Image: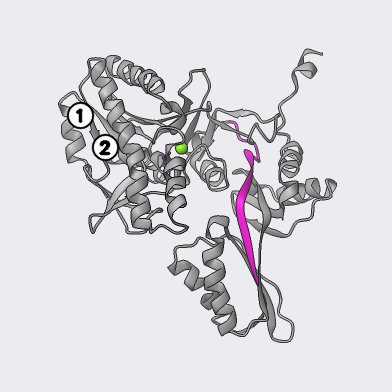
Amino acid sequence: MSLIIQKYGGSSVATTDHIRRVAMKVASTKIQGNKVAVVVSAMGGQTDQLLSMAAEISGSPSGREQDALLATGEQVCAALMSITLESLGHKAKSLMGIQLPLVTDNVHTRARIIKLQTEIIEQILSEDTIPVVAGFQGVTEEGWISTLGRGGSDTTAVALAAALKADCCEIYTDVDGVYTADPNICPKARHINIISYQEMLELAGLGARVLHSRSVELAQKYQVPLVVKSSFGGEKHTWIVNEEEVMENSIIKGVTLEKNVSKISIIRVPDRPGIAHSILSPLAEAAINVDMIIQNASIDGYADFTFTIPTTELEKAKELVGQVAREINAREMLAANNIVKVSAVGIGIKTNPGVASRMFKSLSEENINIEMISTSEYRISCVIEEKYGELAVRAVHKAFGLDKVSKEKTEA
Ligand code: ASP
Ligand code: MG
């Protein structure tokens, strides 16, 4: 008997009709002789709605209360799903993060999982009952409700699959898997059947919103077989597996566009030991993720220091960095959010030296100026002006031969 974790995203449970359809899928998985545990997101749009209600009242609600508010979305959905399963004649029990419990650190709104207790859920499974877990939420060691960051239900599902040593974790969403680029931006994007954890991790971290990056990280760490499917049917899906299992490898697997990017530059920073630390450590303490960092060569003892952060953290970062800039007597601090990051991702990058220049060439042919570059074993990223973002994705996608052959061409 296999144990399958099925996670349903917001669009798959957007209405009670959707919930009924999903519940039937869950039930049929069970009837086929499997054990199944369900993880749900809030009903589609619910989390945004709750956030905007809070925003009507306060520009900066505390993380603790924001988490208490947002966790209700998943609570409602888990209970409705259990009610639906019961109405179909199956035993089901909803479980909140605090009931599992799924214990997290105390970084509210972006908490990380510390441990996931499995006794209660194992008990429920052994009673031939379907556990329906509210995704995205946990409880801090102090006992406060926490959440794992937007899209975090995927991570709940994978953590559960890992803790229960499930045979498979199925992520149901409104698309039938992962594409070589966002088809809304790049109509010639192709469906990917199988991709390595590492590539998926890069894609997820770079704005491909199919999976929460932390979920991919956990899946790789605990070797959870992960598959993305559409809850609206269709044959296609994407498996996320170990690198060795991906037979057909192209140099570049996908191209992403990340819009939530801002940069901060500090001009004329004294060039001495400890400066990078003093600029970046307040950000680290505030749990703000700094991505690309550039310090140019120093001229008469001064250098310019630039880095990127998520736009959602820009205001806070400006405050923190502004203070440091004054303390170290830098000339000024500049901030910009009219930038985007275009990235090419693939395991072929580390073994094919020409990949970066191929990407730069495709951008230059479109007259797109590159402001910042970073590379790793698995990706090349360029920061460019926002207005060229989509054009850049199409250009890079084409340059790496990822465009699907158009129908007319095949028929001709
Ligand atoms: N409901 C949360 C969100 O909208 C978590 C999730 O859907 O995974 O971000
Ligand atoms: Mg999601």
- Residue 217 lies left or right of residue 207; in this view the side is left
Quarter of the image containing the C terminus? top right
Label 2 crowd (10 A; few <14 / some 14-19 / many >=20): some
- Residue visible at 33% across and 45% down? 137
- Residue 123 lies left or right of residue 72; in this view the side is left
Could you tell me the amino acid type at mark 1?
Leu
The residues colored magenta run 248-265
Main SS class of the magenta portion in the image: strand
- Residue visible at 74% across and 48% down? 387
Q: Which residue is mark 1?
A: 125
Measured along the vertical axis of the image, is residue 359 above or below residue 397?
below
Q: Quadrant of ligand 1?
A: top left
- Residue visible at 67% across and 31% down? 189
As helix, strand or loop, the secondary structure at mark 1 comes to: helix
- Residue 112 lies left or right of residue 366; in this view the side is left
Mark 2 or mark 1, earlier in chain: 1
Q: Which residue is mark 2?
A: 164
Model colouring: one colour
Q: CA distance from mark 2 to mark 1?
A: 11 Å
The percent coordinates of residue 179 (x first, y second) are 60, 32
As helix, strand or loop, the secondary structure at mark 2 comes to: loop
> From this viewpoint, is residue 210 visible?
yes
Measured along the vertical axis of the image, is residue 306 above or below residue 181?
below
- Residue visible at 22% across and 45% down? 117
